Image (cartoon, rainbow, N blue to C red):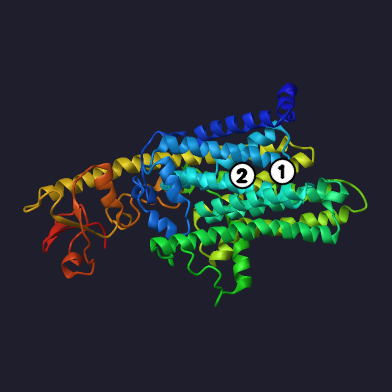
Amino acid sequence: MGAFVSFWQKEWRDGAERFRWAIVSTIAFYLAAHGYRLSHAAFAGDGLLMIYKDDAAWEVALGRIVHPLLVLLRGGLETPFLIGLLAAWWIGLSVWLMTGFLEIRRRLGVVSTSGVCVCNVILTTTNGAYLFISDYYMLALCLAVGAAILVWQGAAGQVQTGIRLRRLLLAAVCIALSVGIYQAYICVTLALLLLKWLFTAMEAPEKVALPGGRVRLRQILFMAVPFLLGGGVYYGIWKAAQRVLHIWTADGYNGMASLGDYGGTSVPALLTETLRRFAVFFVQPEVFVTYSYHGQSLSIVWLWLLRICHLAAVASLCAYVVLGGRKGDKRIRRQLVAVVCLVLFPFACNLILLLTKGMEHSLMLYAFILLYVAAIRGLEGLKVRWVSGFLLIPVLWSQIIYANQFYLKLDLYDHAAASMLTRIAVTAEQMPRYKPGQTPVAFAGIFESSPHLARLSFYDEINPLGVGKSLMPYGGTPEHYLTQVLNVPMCFTDVDAEDPAVAAMPCFPEQGSVAWVGDTLVVKLSE
């Protein structure tokens, strides 16, 4: 037992060994949590709409200006295995960079960091319903981590002016590229910088940890330069692309048209909501399906176990600030800097909610998992690094099971969708006057609201964004499944659901749910 513990507590000989461990452990965790997804083509939600990705104008309208270039490089088809391999590579590289930046020196710490970066509900949701962008977002993560390192080295590092400027310029490029893929990953950069500042304040020599006021102000100004420059370059390229290609700015869901407009918004309420959402993520974690007893799911056991682990992670950071770091007469100043970093940390992780004035998507929350990484680093600083293993085993195991159960749900729902839509296609083809590929066909309603769609109660606990009672949670998805999965030739059109003839129809599969309304064959899915 002693030899086993000693093995995991060894420090790295060099960066190359840490790189190998980061990549290998990331791949191992990825296969355990997401391997099922890599071998099954069960497309759901947005992923069903993007089996073939041809929405370059929409991505530019959302400000994701790098997406068309990535599609050009990786291809426009949603290929699970290739996307998974690329995502795992970018995560492994991010772990290597992150652990070096935060000075996580032990094998257990690096492996644990790999685990939390791979086994989390954000990546599971992305792979489940948004697989077509999974590797892109992990590239955005890697660029965000690289940006944090370059910002810190350029602003706080003891380097020559020329080297400093080159690093700050490279940081600006990384920020522009990361934001151009997905704006939310700027939160990773900010959160990592706060963590680096926290641990530096607690552990570095006094001259580095507590520089004079002028030096500190200069560091802050230098740190701001890459964000301003990178943001300016990104914004300029975005607006130029819109002007040249005549592309609008999305002003609805996920759009940036109202960015910066806080008219009528209560800033204190928004700050409170930002902190509340961060807390809810850890207080109400996703749990997997287990037994039920007298109508009560025993998953509540795991719910409370995860809550305890999350509370322990927060407590470990607080204990580090109180007990860890260097001793000396300037210790209070060190602790004050650390406390400020801790207070700002949730707001940095959830900056997107502040910028969007309350609109937040599940895929925007990746920075939240840095709380685990901070706890790993804090426990190393307290010299009780082995505790991180016990702390994270329930978290990682729970997320691995949850991911596999979610992918099983997707797979079974895929079979159900194939069965349902095959029956609809057969019913349509048996209608008099129907000509395949020529007759206008319209769907009224959505599958998610169908009164005849069986609800599997044991799946209720596995309900991430994008997948509810079926693979087709909103309009347009049944059409894509019929044409791109089942290869059924149909000529789709729209129908007014308020039309009296449509309103009078029953819902599929009842008799009369597929009927003619004028020259259009209407399939009524729900009211």
How far across and down, in percent of the image, does residue 363 sit? Answer: 50, 52
Mark 1 surroundings: few (<14), some (14-19) or many (≥20) residues within 10 A: some
Residue extending farthest to the front is 162
Whether residue 167 sits left or right of residue 210 in the image: it is left
Element at label 1: loop
Residue 217 found in image quarter: bottom right
Q: Which residue is mark 1?
A: 102
Mark 2 surroundings: few (<14), some (14-19) or many (≥20) residues within 10 A: some
Q: CA distance from mark 2 to mark 1?
A: 28 Å
The first of marks 2 and 1 along the sequence is: 1
How far across and down, in percent of the image, does residue 26 sit? Answer: 57, 34
Determine if residue 34 is in view.
no
Q: Which residue is mark 2?
A: 305
How far across and down, in percent of the image, does residue 302 sit? Answer: 57, 44
Whether residue 236 sits left or right of residue 452 in the image: it is right
Residue extending farthest to the left is 432
